[in-house]
Amino acid sequence: MPRRKLAIFDVDGTIFRWSLFIEIVEGLIEKGYFPQKAFQEINARYLQWMDRKIHYNIYLEQVIQTYYKYLKGCKYSDVEKVARHVILEKGNRVYRYTSTLIKTLKKKGYFLLIISGSPEFIVQEFARLFGFDQWYGSIYEVKNGIFTGAPINRDSVFKKGKVLDKFLKSASFQVDLKNSIAVGDTASDAPLLERVGKPIAFDPDRDLLVYANKKKWKIILERKDVIYEVKSFKTVTV
């Protein structure tokens, strides 16, 4: 049986030009499923991040904690409806480089796989929009159609190498990792990039940039209407 090549993608900041996690929380607030005080909680951190007083990860962690806090008691059908609306309205806000790469690799017969830390139900909507074959996201417990608020796999899904191992064990075909591609933008994606023969650090954060340079991985930046490959760089301390 011939082995099949994978194209593994992170979503937030890699394909989607923002965060699906943030979008679903803001959507749930806008539609009234989360209280307005949820907005106050995340907006305070958002403003701190915009003023460069805190790291983006601190703001994102606040969004995640707010999601946990108010998800309990929500109907799955309501949250899923908001996810569909978010993707319908904003799903095409993507980077040109990665969205074009997805189309190219799909035509070449790559198996398209998403591994993301965002909630699986919104990752699913996004993945279907772009024709992915399989996807993994954070899963939250549902009983009788109602969210209990308990995460099922949040810790494991952020360990993306383990998620890839899970996929490889369950795949119905043999995988050619040597000729596979992985694309990510943060250090949490490094375990995926390390497993394939063609890793791409796309618009990487500082940690991934330094690591990718050390490993001699391809580094691609997209700024405004320009896409370019970084061959060498020097970090600047201000």
Image (cartoon, rainbow, N blue to C red):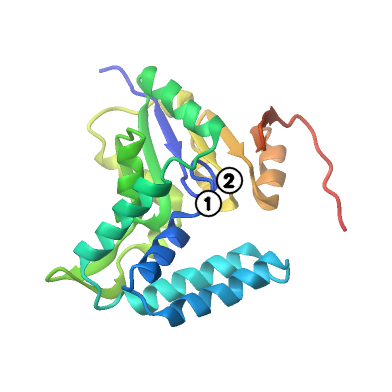
Q: Tell me if mark 2 has few (under 14), some (14-19) or many (20+) residues whose alpha carbon lies within 10 angstroms of its own.
A: many
Q: Is mark 2 on a helix, strand or loop?
A: loop
The answer to whether 61 is drawn above or below residue 172 in the figure is below
The C terminus: image quadrant: bottom right
Which residue is tagged 2? 185
How far apart are labels 2 and 1 at the CA level?
12 Å
Q: Does the residue at mark 2 contact the one at mark 1 (Cβ under 8 Å)?
A: no
Count of labels shown?
A: 2
Position of residue 78 in the picture relative to residue 145 (left or right): right
Residue occupying the point 37% across, 37% down: 113
The N terminus: image quadrant: top left
Which residue is tagged 1? 18
Residue occupying the point 30% across, 61% down: 139
- Disc assigned to residue 143: none
Pick whichever of labels 2 and 1 is earlier in the sequence: 1
Residue 168 appearing in the image = no
Residue 231 appearing in the image = yes
Q: Nearer the viewer, mark 2 or mark 1?
A: 1
In the image, farthest residue toward the left? 144
Identity of the amino acid at label 2? Asp
**Which of the 4 image quarters holds residue 8?**
top left
Where does the image place residue 50, in percent across and percent down from the top left? Answer: 68, 65
Where does the image place residue 177, in percent across and percent down from the top left? Answer: 43, 29
Residue occupying the point 26% across, 58% down: 80
Where does the image place residue 223, in percent across and percent down from the top left? Answer: 68, 38
Q: Is mark 1 on a helix, strand or loop?
A: loop
Identity of the amino acid at label 1? Trp
Q: Tell me if mark 1 has few (under 14), some (14-19) or many (20+) residues whose alpha carbon lies within 10 angstroms of its own.
A: some
The answer to whether 134 is drawn above or below residue 49 in the figure is above
Residue occupying the point 59% across, 77% down: 44
Where does the image place residue 91, in percent across and percent down from the top left? Answer: 41, 44
